[in-house]
Amino acid sequence: MITYTVAETGWLWQNPDLEAVLLPAVSAATNLVLADAEHRVGAHRGPGRYGHAADALGAEVGKVEGAGIVGRVIGRGPAAFKLRFLNWGTKQHPIPRVRGRRGTRKILKFAGGEVFRRYVWHPGEPGIQFTYESQRATAPAVYELLDRAVGDYVGR
């Protein structure tokens, strides 16, 4: 998690315009992290029946009681569940049978055809840790962006 704190003391917090300065800066910083995360996730397979995992990423910025102004990169939509698997990986597991037409056990459908089996064994995949890597890669730019916004407001 990237944390940026401005001390809530003195004349700076008595002026309500600070929030008007910080909200766009936090929004821009969140969009930097989102773009990096989409790039990292976009290299992985998709779209599948639920859509591509990169399309499931979104950003939201708002004021949270006790935490101040918060920007988050979140998962949305039907493909959001894929993000957890991409981030932390999966263990080996069987993919259970699915009933197709006429009671045939169709497991997977892909570009070259279909696989008909009782089950298919998924070998598992290591996680790519895109949440951590995106924050690590964009942290210097995020801090610079927020420093510049606060510095311009204060008059540095």
Image (spheres, rainbow, N blue to C red):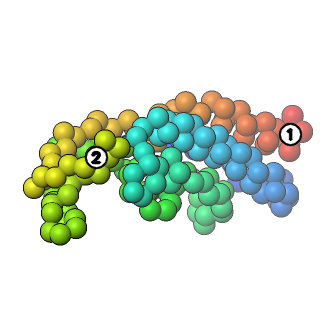
The three-letter amino acid code for the residue at tag 1 is: Asp
User: 32 or 115, which is in the foreground?
Assistant: 115
Identify the mark at residue 110; answer none if there is no mark: none
Outermost right residue: 155
Q: Secondary structure at mark 1?
A: helix
Does label 2 or label 1 sit earlier along the sequence? 2
Residue 109 appears in the rendering:
yes
Q: Position of residue 127 (x, y in %)?
A: 33, 38
Front residue (pair 74, 106): 106
Left/right placement of residue 97 relative to residue 132 reads left
Residue 15 on image: x %, y %: 85, 58
Q: Mark number for residue 152?
A: 1
Residue at the left extreme of this rendering:
118
Q: Residue furthest bottom?
A: 102
Type of the residue with mark 2: Gly
Q: Position of residue 119 (x, y in %)?
A: 12, 53
For the question of whether residue 33 can be seen, the reply is no
Single out the mark in the foreground, 2 or 1. Answer: 2
* Residue at x 64%, y 40% (from the top left corner): 32
Residue at left offset 47%, top offset 40%: 41
Kindly identify the residue that appears in the image at 17 percent across and 69 percent down. Answer: 102
**64 with respect to 149 (left or right):** left
Counting labels gives 2
Q: Which residue is mark 2?
A: 113
Q: Quadrant of residue 45?
A: top left
Give the percent coordinates (x, y) of residue 83: 41, 49
Indicate the quadrant where residue 100 lies: bottom left
